[in-house]
Amino acid sequence: MTSILTNNAAMAALQTLRSIDAKMQDTQARVSSGLRVGTASDNAAYWSIATTMRSDNMALSAVQDALGLGAAKVDTAYAAMEGAVEVVKEIKAKMVAATEEGVDRKKIQAEISQLQEQLRSIASSASFSGENWMKADLTAAGGTVQKSVVGSFIRSEDGSVSVKKINYDLTANTVLFDDGGDLGILDRIFNVTPASITLDINVSGVTQKYTVMAYTIDALIADGATFEGNYANTTVPAADYVKVQGVWVKAVDSTTAPGQEIAATSTVPAAASWVVDVTPIPPATVVVAPASLDTVDITALTNEELATMVQATDVALEAMISATADLGSIAMRIGMQENFVASLTDSIDSGIGRLVDADMNEESTRLKALQTQQQLAIQALSIANTASESILTLFRQ
């Protein structure tokens, strides 16, 4: 049936054209944006994942900036400590030269004074972004001030996020000057020798070396430990330490256990006769430097005090060298973390691209095909609309 009111062919052609136009609109959006999934309506799951990972990448970008700032702080501290090490080496050399008889210590002290000023200058100028790791108020902080550098951003499997940091402690062995007291490497007075001593001690029949505080060796002997042997013609007071064949051992009270004495070995013949040395445990010698490196004046020191000061300078130098090594290790770790974060950012970008990026080769081919289909649909619609014109011929007869 032919009707001038209802043109089914035209409606079908128009519906086809609308469908093609919708597809062309989607394809043109992909071509213009480069995204296959640009909105949540395109693919809700992929859009959600991509949006979350883009957010994480922005956080990683902030981590990169923080790492760069942290690296600058560490590099500044490293350069300062490295420079201070060279100055202290010079001070040590000057002090050694001053030990020579007949030298003019005043002239050497004038040089040392300039070197001391240089150390103060280095510590004061080692500041980056308002932070100085060469100076800190250790006294007020209880001996430790913790500094940190943002190291990474982590999203766990449960969706929780956290920021990890690289920590560095400012302590008496890493800070040149203590602003609140005298705990820094350069402003404190060193004990040249530690208040301890290393002894060969028999514990449960086993002789081992122990480094202990003088006269505090009792803590190393377990309660109830028993050692038995024989000794001749020697009375040993209870709980004293004595030497048996060169080894320090704990004595048993000879008044309550006659003939018994701690042996230097776990297997002692019953008839063994030991020579017991009842000399007390030698106390550890503690030598205190006469001044700090920041205040020392060698013209006021005796030869013995100067020799002690040389040792103290060497102790300070060792602490500074160790601190320099620590800073170098932190700088290396930050550099490695910077490279890792950059690589991780690229990997996340690549993963997001696999989820949501459009294949431009495919989209350009599809666009060309849709343009052809659109032209054909328009032609079909035109034919359908002109079909009803044939009815006019019936009325011309």
Image: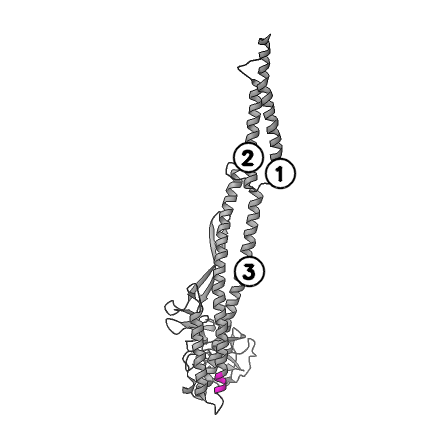
- Per the rendered image, the range of residues in magenta is 94-101
Is residue 97 one of those drawn in magenta? yes
Whole-number angstrom distance, CA of label 3 to CA of label 2: 44 Å
| Residue picked out by circle 3 | 336
Whole-number angstrom distance, CA of label 3 to CA of label 1: 40 Å
Which one is nearer the viewer's eye here, 216 or 342?
342
Image position of 14 (left or right of 235):
right
Q: Secondary structure at mark 2?
A: helix
Where residue 314 sits in the image (x, y, percent)?
A: 49, 79
Is residue 46 one of those drawn in magenta? no
Q: Secondary structure at mark 3?
A: helix
Which one is nearer the viewer's eye here, 320 or 210?
320
- For image coordinates 42% across by 71% down, the residue present is 124
Q: Which mark is residue 362?
A: 1
Where residue 160 sits in the image (x, y, percent)?
A: 47, 49
Whole-number angstrom distance, CA of label 1 to CA of label 2: 13 Å
Magenta: predominant secondary structure element? helix
* Tag 1 and tag 2, C-beta contact below 8 Å: no
Where residue 183 sits in the image (x, y, percent)?
A: 41, 73
Q: Amino acid at mark 3?
A: Met
Q: Where is residue 107, by image quadrant?
A: bottom left
Q: Amino acid at mark 1?
A: Glu
Q: Which mark is residue 93?
A: none
Where residue 306 sits in the image (x, y, percent)?
A: 45, 85
Q: Is residue 89 above or below residue 166?
A: below
| Residue picked out by circle 2 | 26
Q: Is residue 47 above or below residue 259?
A: above
